[in-house]
Image (cartoon, helix red, strand yellow):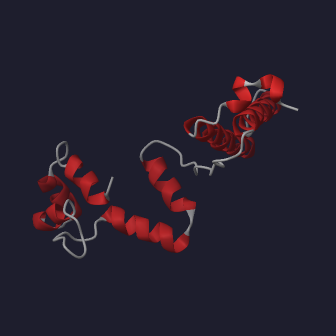
Amino acid sequence: MKSHEVFRELFSTASPKEIAAELGLSLSMIYKWAEPAGPGGSGTPNPLDRISTLLGLTNDPRIAQWICQRAGGFFTRNPHAPDDDQDCVVAATQQIVSEFAELLSSIAIAASDSQITETESRQIRARWEHLKSVTESFVCCCENGNFEPLKHPEDRP
């Protein structure tokens, strides 16, 4: 979905007039955000376009992380699953199990004294985010239809 399309859809649930008033911008500027920008379009670069440009210039995930936190979530980069690796699903499954075990171990160690410090909390969060990324690798393998290792386990070395 293109950024101006996001704004077009947002305007069905959020008032452009209220957005303009809150941001101190003209109503026409807000409406231009919902039109394609650049050659052939009469729109103007909107905040999403600018964030995309910042991400491209800095390649710094803290920008996306900050936005995700504001929306009540957490940013995790999608991994690149190989298209031709026949062992993708099996390897990803094994890695998920291993990473989950490490997460549970971190939680058990942190909670063993009936309290979890800020440092321990950050470590648990980091392990959790890594597990989500590893799980996303598995999902990518599934989406690529890479099920051969699961269909023919007798053929595996």
Q: Answer above or below: position of 104 versus 124.
A: above
57 lies left or right of 2: right
Say whether residue 157 is left or right of residue 119: right
Asked if residue 113 shows in the view, the reply is: no
Residue 88 image position (x, y, % from top left): 71, 40
Which quarter of the figure is the C terminus placed in? top right
Q: Is residue 39 visible?
A: yes
Residue drawn at x 31%, y 58% as measured from the top left: 3
- Quarter holding residue 87: top right
Q: Position of residue 29 (x, y in %)?
A: 16, 67
Residue 140 occupies quadrant: top right
Residue 59, position as x, y percentages in the image = 56, 68
Q: Residue at x 54, y 72 (%)?
A: 58
For image coordinates 50% across by 74% down, the residue present is: 57
Q: How many marks?
A: 0
Please give the name of the residue rendered at 60% of the width and 34% of the height, measured from the top-left corner.
142
Q: Which of the 4 quarters of the picture holds residue 41?
A: bottom left
Is 94 drawn above or below residue 55 in the view shown?
above
Residue 32: x %, y % from top left: 17, 65
Q: Nearer the viewer, residue 126 or 142?
A: 142
**48 up-or-down from 70: above or below:** below
- For the residue pair 42 and 156, the one nearer the viewer reads as 156
Residue farthest to the right? 157
- Residue 51 is left or right of residue 81, and the answer is left
